[in-house]
Amino acid sequence: MSTDAVLYDHPGPRAKIRNVVLTVVFGVALLGLAYWIYARFDEKGQWAGPLWKPFTAASTWTDYILPGLGHTLGAAAVAMVLALTFGIVFAVGRLSDHWWVRLPAGAVVEFFRAVPLLLLMFFIFFGVPFITEQPMSIFWAVVLGLTLYNGSVLAEAFRAGIYAVPRGQSEAAYAIGMRKSQVMREILVPQAARSMLPVIVSQMVVLVKDTALGYIISYSELLQMGVNNVAANFGNVVQAAIVVAIIFILVNSSLTALAGWLERRTRRVGKAPRTAALVEAGDAV
Amino acid sequence: MDVFSDPYNVDVYVTGFLWILKLTAASTVGALVLGVLLSAMRVSPVPVLRGFGAAWVNVFRNTPLTLIIFFCYFGLFSTLGFSVSDEIDLNNYWLGVIGLSVYTAAFVCEAIRSGINTVPAGQAEAARAIGMSFRQTLTMIVLPQAGRAVIAPLGSIFIALSKNATIVGTIGLMESSNAMKELINANGDAVIPIFLVFAGTFAVVLIPAGYGFGWLANRLAVKR
Amino acid sequence: MRITRLAATFGALTMALAVAACGGGDDESGSSGGASGIVGKASSDKKLVIGVKADQPGLGLQTGSTYTGFDIEIGKIIAKGLGVEESGIEWKTTVSANREPYIQQGQVDLVVATYTINDERKKVVSFGGPYYIAGQDLLVPVDSTITGPESLAGKKVCSVSGSTPAKRIQTDYKDAQLQQFDSYSKCVTALAGGQVDAVTTDDIILAGYASQEQYAGKFKVVGKPFSEEPYGIGLKKDDSEGCKKINEILTAAASDGSYKKAWDDSLGKSGTAAPELDTTKLTNCA
């Protein structure tokens, strides 16, 4: 159901007046709130020039914020590639005919979906070196944590996507004598991947946000560099956090916009099966 | 497992998960109420309300939760002077609840909105045809049906919420991630059992919860 | 045969992941340490990688692409003594949590990063120094009534989570309420806003924050240290030759004035006189 104007009638004269009144009341309330926040910040001296001035200097950007953003996006990019691979492998694994593939794959996916990423990263950095007797670099601890968690989420998404490919597709493939691995590789996975594109991109947003959790093992990502290090120099924690938040919102909004564009595109092609986007919506938290 | 024969360590563990439980419980209520309100705004006839809902979702969904929790402390508490209790832990707990609620509400709102999309247009049209107002159409016809459709996604959202509750540790609450950190720092030789106990606790609770929500969603699904 | 391919792909990918996981060190800096130790490495490569803090004003602070602070000056003295030019030093940011691993993995040759010598750490790394004896203290607003740790009852104290100072408050001063953050900058911001009554960590770190421009005249360090934190220079375990050499360099620096100069160029800028470097307290490098 398209929500536009299905839930309510075209406004008549009374409804129009009511809407205008609501608009004005709510708008004034919002402006009032905004002004109150502004005034409180002002009262506490948070708008003071010296606190904001560092952000007009190029060096603040080239020394802290951009390298931090680079580390954030770098870890997110590597983790995304790995998570996609992990997701496809384990989605296919969970759909295997053999219980000794299906069960372990399912257990891995369920486990990593249930464990908070914060605990996972901390463990990978401090615990895994005990098992491998190899030191773990911070970068890989962050990437691995992101991969295991997001890979597991993607595995579930892919599985739903593969289920959503019309049965006729695999039946036809079997009918012309393809083996199961061929059906999976040539028929099901490509179609599922295309239909899951929006889900994949929204998972990317999650990934970018979650790199911020690297703070627990002091990965020098945007939050660490842009808030802690900048504030150590200029004593402006709140201002630095506002700037960093804006950067995150800009990066992620563009990714979300990309997701929307991709969704419209795949819908226009029309042949990709409409998947249970609903079911997945909850996973991208 | 020797680590957990020390009653102090057990206490740290239990306290950690109690905070998670309390954070999850309060934030679930907060996020649900806020999320439903926001989704109502997003489908309402008033453009300002629609814009407000959309802006909320855009801002909070795209900001790392760590930063939102941070703003609850340094923005809401420090600068705006919002304070619940003079006790540090309790105050941080409520700041955490607020942060988790506003963040999760954005996802709840989106889930409900897509739930509304699963309700056939005829339902709302019929409601309007018998003279129902926007509010009546939404609360009596559309939301009850949408609610059934969104049980599964809401389930995932609340499971994620309970995991996200660990992030409130950034403002110093001794929830399970800080508890695990403390135990590992003090017992460097028992990192693996400590992790398995903490991760295992989450897994034991959350994996069945996930299946539970799935079962519930199937049972309550609107058969069309 | 149906599953072999799948299984093979699966296996290969798992292995690839495992290799990626263990491959670690995306930026290993070619230092092998080993038999020759730090002295040998310095004389042959003319290069040193020194791990320092990046977010502690007065001690180790990354300002732009350069590092400044007392720890940095000490690092330069040690490097000079080992025959390495300033241009041959590569500064590397470390945080409290990764100092030991960095030394063990050889990602840094030395660590000069507010690094307290204690028995726990001595199990995994060696220490030269101490080059400074810090002590846990309190940073409070200038008009505060707090005079020392015993007047903390009912007060709110802030420190970095999981740190030794935080732990000491929890165990020895239970009447105080502890607020924990992941960085001292946040603690100091909370102190400025009045959300906490005091910030606690080593006096020298607090002094660094107190002398920051934005906080000039707002805070004071109470000046009653209630612990002893000897700052050492961390290096690979069992490099006793390197450790001895570092102590020799420090002894020389104490007498020829370069230690005093290091202080005056960093923390001393706020007017505090340079401390005396007590060379009798240097570790025995066993």
Image: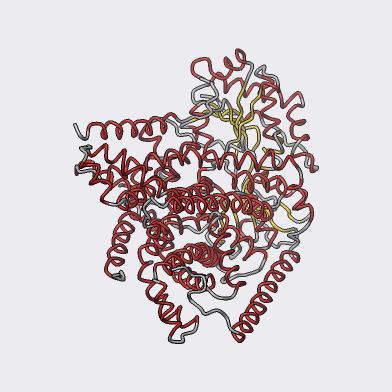
Q: Quadrant of residue C233?
A: top right
Residue C205 spot, x, y in % from top left: 66, 44
Q: Is residue B81 above or below residue C229?
A: below
Task: Please identify the quadrant where the N terminus of chain A is shown.
Answer: bottom left
Left or right of A237? Residue C19 is: left
Left or right of A143? Residue C70 is: right
Of all residues, the one furthest to the top in this rendering is C44
Applied colour scheme: secondary structure
Q: Is residue A279 above or below residue A98?
A: below
Residue B85 spot, x, y in % from top left: 56, 71
Residue placed most toward the observer, A5 or C184: A5
Residue placed most toward the observer, A25 or A185: A185
Residue placed most toward the observer, C36 or B56: B56
Residue A5 spot, x, y in % from top left: 52, 74
Q: Residue at x 27, y 31 (%)?
A: C8
Residue B35 spot, x, y in % from top left: 49, 69
**Number of numbered callouts drawn:** 0
Residue placed most toward the observer, C104 or A80: A80
Q: Residue at x 64, y 84 (%)?
A: A17
